[in-house]
Image (spheres, rainbow, N blue to C red):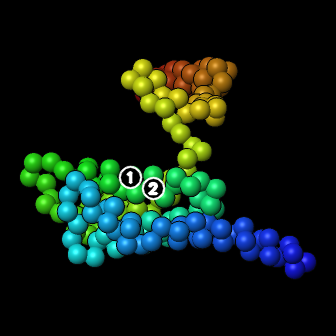
């Protein structure tokens, strides 16, 4: 029983150990290389969010690139706010919510979507659109025709 509990404990907390292997200060420095400067304390907040997301996602323990890719995604989210007349720095979640949302997502490298102007490939997952059967559509159309003709018949009689 003790061995089982130890195994479960190690499995559950492996993600935390992986996320903590890169110091908070190093993540802050990487985030400060973004397209826009960060207001005081923002890099620390975003770094803490990244580490929390890594710790919460079980799969990050087995994906050594997840934290680095998550950092790159936050930098990409920062670049969204780069336009003429846009903000001069990243200041708060209220002003630049996409950056904070992205900092709370741990990237799963096992999942991917391939984009091309002519198609979108979601991998091996079948994408289906449930459509009503033809008989249901015919039944509804017939019912509508009957109701419409009865209504016309009643209005013509009046």
Picture layout, residue 42 above or below residue 65 = below
Can you tell which mark lies on residue 72?
1
Mark 1 crowdedness (10 Å alpha carbons): few <14, some 14-19, many ≥20 = some
Residue 150 seen in this snapshot: no
- Across and down, in percent, residue 144 comes to 54, 25
Judge from the rendering whether residue 138 lies leftward or rightward of residue 153; answer left or right: right
Asked if the residue under mark 1 is in contact with the one under mark 2, i.e. CB atoms within 8 Å, the reply is: yes
Cα distance, mark 2 to mark 1?
Answer: 6 Å
Q: Quadrant of residue 48?
A: bottom left
Q: Residue at x 65, y 68 (%)?
A: 14
Circle 2: element type: helix
Q: Residue at x 44, y 65 (%)?
A: 50
- Quarter holding the N terminus is bottom right
Circle 1: element type: helix
Q: Residue at x 50, y 65 (%)?
A: 53
- Across and down, in percent, residue 65 comes to 52, 52
Can you tell which mark lies on residue 68?
2
Residue 68 seen in this snapshot: yes
Front-lying residue, 145 or 2: 2
Judge from the rendering whether residue 37 lies leftward or rightward of residue 27; answer left or right: left
Q: Residue at x 34, y 68 (%)?
A: 28
């Amino acid at each position: 029983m003790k061995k089982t509990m130890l195994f479960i404990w190690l499995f559950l907390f492996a993600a935390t150990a992986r996320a903590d292997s890169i110091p908070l200060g190093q993540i802050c420095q990487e985030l400060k290389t973004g397209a826009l400067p960060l207001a005081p304390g923002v890099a620390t907040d975003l770094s803490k969010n990244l580490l929390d997301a890594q710790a919460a996602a079980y799969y990050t323990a087995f994906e050594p690139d997840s934290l680095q890719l998550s950092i790159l995604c936050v930098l990409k989210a920062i670049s969204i706010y780069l336009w003429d007349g846009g903000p001069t720095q990243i200041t708060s979640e209220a002003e630049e919510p996409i950056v904070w949302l992205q900092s709370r997502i741990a990237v799963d490298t096992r999942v991917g979507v391939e984009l091309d102007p002519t198609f979108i490939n979601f991998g091996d997952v079948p994408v289906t659109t449930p459509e009503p059967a033809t008989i249901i559509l015919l039944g509804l159309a017939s019912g509508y025709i009957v109701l419409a003709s009865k209504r016309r018949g009643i209005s013509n009689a009046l």
